[in-house]
Image: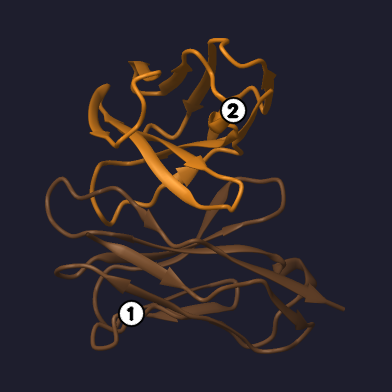
Chain colours: A orange, B brown
Amino acid sequence: DTAVSQTPKYLVTQMGNDKSIKCEQNLGHDTMYWYKQDSKKFLKIMFSYNNKELIINETVPNRFSPKSPDKAHLNLHINSLELGDSAVYFCASSQGPRPTDTQYFGPGTRLTVL
Amino acid sequence: GDSVTQMEGPVTLSEEAFLTINCTYTATGYPSLFWYVQYPGEGLQLLLKATKADDKGSNKGFEATYRKETTSFHLEKGSVQVSDSAVYFCALSPPGAGSYQLTFGKGTKLSVIP
């Protein structure tokens, strides 16, 4: 029943490790996104894919690499984790990449880097 | 660039009080405007949206009117409930092809006390 799901929900890891967060949507949407929410609740887009192609790539360290194996999945891999990467990461999807398309969000993954 | 400014929180109201959360934006043309709500421990949910000037979005007793002349999209509710306690985000999506990324305000935390 879950429209946009993310795994894991919580992720605690040491500095320097590599980790992945997975996202899946069962809405049949073409477009998917990754957002980062910092400790002050500020949300900022990181990446967007449409039909498995990267269409938004904001100023994000190249330690972050999104991968979209198919339209229903958008995973986020992070290399060499740093303390500043601690945040809540939200996946979202929309029917298409249009301004009027509603984005549906997953429950978030809380990443804590120690 | 595009930006969204929301009133600073937190906002604390008694049950059945009137709610206004101010939101103003800076963008060229006619962006689409959104209010998202984030309940504790959850992802964002679309609350309402408006895609052209003078449109009124409404949902669950909340309303917001797209005012081009004042570049505003203030959120209102006539009588808040404890269950409305959440963080509210105003967002815009610029017009035009390829302009589908959401720009969020910093969020306004609302606490409703019985």
**Side of B51 where B39 appears, left or right:** right
Residue drawn at (53%, 10%) of the image: A18
Report whether mark 1 lies on the same chain as mark 2: no
Q: Is residue B47 above or below residue B13?
A: above
- For the C terminus of chain B, the image quarter is bottom right
Residue drawn at (77%, 75%) of the image: B112
- For the N terminus of chain B, the image quarter is bottom left
Taking depth in this image into account, of A96 and B99 the one nearest to the observer is B99
Kindly state the secondary structure of the residue where label 2 is placed.
Answer: helix
Counting other residues with Cα less than 10 Å from the Cα at mark 2, is it few (<14), some (14-19), or many (20 or more)?
some
Disc 1: which chain? B
Task: Provide residue A35's location: percent of width, then percent of height.
Answer: 45, 39
Residue drawn at (65%, 89%) of the image: B18
Q: Is residue B7 above or below residue A59?
A: below
Q: Identify the amino acid type marked 2.
A: Leu
Disc 2: which chain? A
Taking depth in this image into account, of A84 and B57 the one nearest to the observer is A84
Residue A110: image quadrant is top right
Task: Provide residue B66's location: percent of width, then percent of height.
Answer: 33, 79
Q: Is residue A39 above or below residue A11?
A: below
User: Which label belongs to residue A111?
Assistant: none
Residue drawn at (45%, 20%) of the image: A75
**Side of B3 where B81 appears, left or right:** right
Residue A14: image quadrant is top right
Task: Provide residue A8's location: percent of width, then percent of height.
Answer: 64, 22
| Front position among marks 1 and 2 | 2
Task: Provide residue A22's location: percent of width, then percent of height.
Answer: 52, 20
**Image label count:** 2
Q: Identify the amino acid type marked 1.
A: Tyr
User: Which label belongs to residue B66?
Assistant: 1
Q: Which residue is mark 2?
A: A83
